[in-house]
Image (spheres, rainbow, N blue to C red):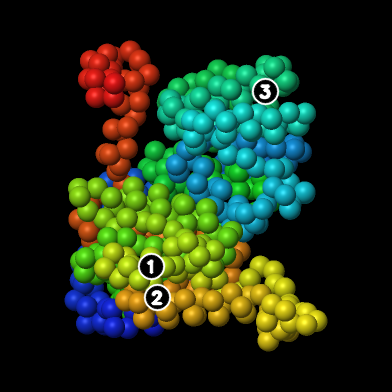
Amino acid sequence: MPLRLNTKYLEGFISEDEIKQISPEIVAAAGTLSRADGLGNDFLGWVNLPTNYDREEFARIKSAAQRIKKDDILIVIGIGGSYLGARAVIEAVKSHNYNSLDKDTPDIYFAGNTISSTALNDLIKICENKDFSVNVISKSGTTTEPSLAFRVFKEILENKYGKQGAKSRIYATTDKEKGTLKQLADAEGWETFVVPDNVGGRFSVLTAVGLLPIAVAGIDIDELMRGARFAQENLNDDDLSKNDCYKYAAIRNIMYRKGKKVELLASYEPCFDMMAQWYKQLFGESEGKDGKGLFPCSVIFSTDLHSLGQYIQESGAELLFETVVNSVKPQTDLTLGEVEGNLDGLNFLSGKTMSYVNQKAFEGTVLAHCDGGVANVVLEMPEINEFEIGYFIYFMEKTCAVSGYTLGVNPFNQPGVESYKKNMFALLGKPGFEDRKKELESRIN
């Protein structure tokens, strides 16, 4: 049984009549998506990806993963959708402590998602005296953050193994035919994988972009795709009472129209933190434009109840609603024993499991927040494994597309992303930005 939408805690916040009223808009948006005649329709390759992926490349991904597994480390170089999805799946299915726990597969580190010299130097030190490979992910090959990191690690590989040795340790995931990275990869003889032209970065986790690092971590990518395929085949009913994806899209838009500005994604499992980061890019880049859109945030409870719980409880009602991903069955569990003297006063929990306590924390929190005026949507995930995560990824991608079309925006572009880049290039003295450089420096100095 895959992910299930639980609307019990929306009582008093959203009525069934409100959902019925918005249903025609949701169905129309879903129709736009299925007919591929809406804004951004050049980027709908993800819609049929779970059933229409490149089988030959899929086999090459598995083969490359087996070769990389002989190393101590894999460095994945990419930013945004070029790393978030892979890291999210690895940490969710394996553990957020994956590198410390799993000794049967290489440690996996992510570079090129920041311009911090300290962070880059840390990874360089980690790779000292270790055998490692690099998976560089960039459609163009000119994105600043990954390009800088790749320069550094390419030089280290060539110094360590020689040009010929480095050749077999560099894997480029990039455009099929064009772009700087593709040209360089062909010239150097690196194995390449494809970033599909019709799949945007934040929707690319089920392509080679995410699948190669995920496979290196020892995760069953066949099961991941099976979960996504099950979602693709079963989330098409125009009756919102039978389609949790469309109903969730409806709820989000109703909340937005009621004046909510923020959707707070909550989980009670630390391994889900990077999946929440992936969610933030997915919805933030897709809906945040034209002065519209919910601001996506995330928390891990109960940890963040001790920092943000006060605000949510006492001041959150006008600003936000929560979407809680509640994992019903833990990956592992622990039974609590009895302590002599009962100094901590917790012997009443003896014989109970930690997952039981965690579930009661969820139940107590959702009731308290609802009492505080904060609506809660609950997505019940039976357990965290490859199939369920594959289903969750597709569920969220389709929700995002339908919700974005209902909102009246193009869910597949990101016009605001370039502004900071132009300013940064000008301040760095990139040729062609001389006039902008003078204007910006006059505002800074």
Relative image position of residue 422 (x, y in whole percent): 30, 26
Relative image position of residue 399 (x, y in whole percent): 36, 62
Q: Is residue 59 visible?
A: no
In the displayed orientation, state which residue is furthest to the bottom.
348
- Residue 210 — which label? none
Say whether marks 1 and 2 touch (CB < 8 Å).
Answer: yes
Q: Mark 3 points at which residue?
A: 157
| Number of other residues with Cα within 10 Å of mark 1, as a class: few under 14, some 14 to 19, many 20 or more | many
| Front: mark 2 or 3 | 2
Residue at point 80%, 81% (across, down) = 340
Helix, strand or loop at label 3? It is helix
Helix, strand or loop at label 1? It is helix
Amino acid type, callout 2 = His
Residue at point 21%, 65% (across, down) = 259
Judge whether 71 appears above or below 411 on screen.
Answer: above
Q: Mark 2 points at which residue?
A: 369
Q: Quadrant of residue 256?
A: bottom left
Relative image position of residue 374 (x, y in whole percent): 34, 73
Q: Mark 1 points at which residue?
A: 312
